[in-house]
Amino acid sequence: MIAALTLISASSAEAGPTNGDKEALASAKEYLNSQAFSMKGLIAQLDSPDGGQFTVAQATYGVDHAGVNWYKEAILSAKQYLQSQAFSLKGLIAQLDSPDGGQFTVAQATYGTDHTGANWNKEALLSAKEYLSTQAFSLSGLIAQLDSPYGGQFTVAQATYGATTAYK
């Protein structure tokens, strides 16, 4: 019985990728041409009922054979996030690493964030303006919000720059 299972497994491996594997690979490449993904995020997209509807095995095959540099994808994803809203360095790393965000590894998220070319003072200013557009803050309150681990997560210097410049 064990010999028969070994023969079946060996012949399946020799048969190469299935049509589903090939389609998942093609779909993975299409998704990567339209936006940045992490490895986990792309597998989830391919396996999703709203995405490719591939099996996890097919999705994994497609992702594993797509020839992706996940660090470059993290840079692209970080830049996409910065186009949509203001982030601090810490906040962007957290977003890229989040299971509800980019789903990159911490190393990939850090690399991606470090290589965006972002001006964190400018990001703090944009964030300060976003906060001021929705509610009133004193200058010190705005700095505290921008610096807070539950708020902007900017450094004190960046928060001070963003708040004082937004107040001008």
Image (cartoon, rainbow, N blue to C red):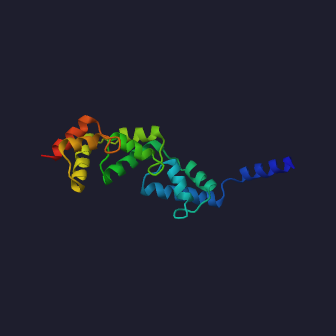
Residue placed most toward the observer, 79 or 99 = 99
Query: In the current view of this chain or complex, which residue is farthest to the bottom?
Result: 50
Q: Residue at image x 26%, y 45%?
A: 123
Q: Residue at image x 52%, y 48%?
A: 39
In the rendered image, residue 99, in percent from the top left (x then y), is placed at: 48, 49
Residue placed most toward the observer, 73 or 83 = 83
107 w.r.t. 26: above or below? above
Counting the numbered discs, the total is 0
Residue placed most toward the observer, 103 or 74 = 103
In the rendered image, residue 126, in percent from the top left (x then y), is placed at: 24, 48
Q: Residue at image x 15%, y 46%?
A: 167
Residue placed most toward the observer, 129 or 20 = 129
Answer with left or right where residue 53 lies relative to residue 71: right
In the rendered image, residue 68, in percent from the top left (x then y), is placed at: 50, 47
Can residue 144 be seen in this snapshot? yes
Query: In the current view of this chain or complex, which residue is farthest to the right?
Result: 1
Can residue 119 be seen in this snapshot? no
Q: Quadrant of residue 114?
A: top left
In the rendered image, residue 93, in percent from the top left (x then y), is placed at: 40, 42
Query: In the current view of this chain or complex, which residue is farthest to the left?
Result: 168
Q: Residue at image x 79%, y 52%?
A: 8
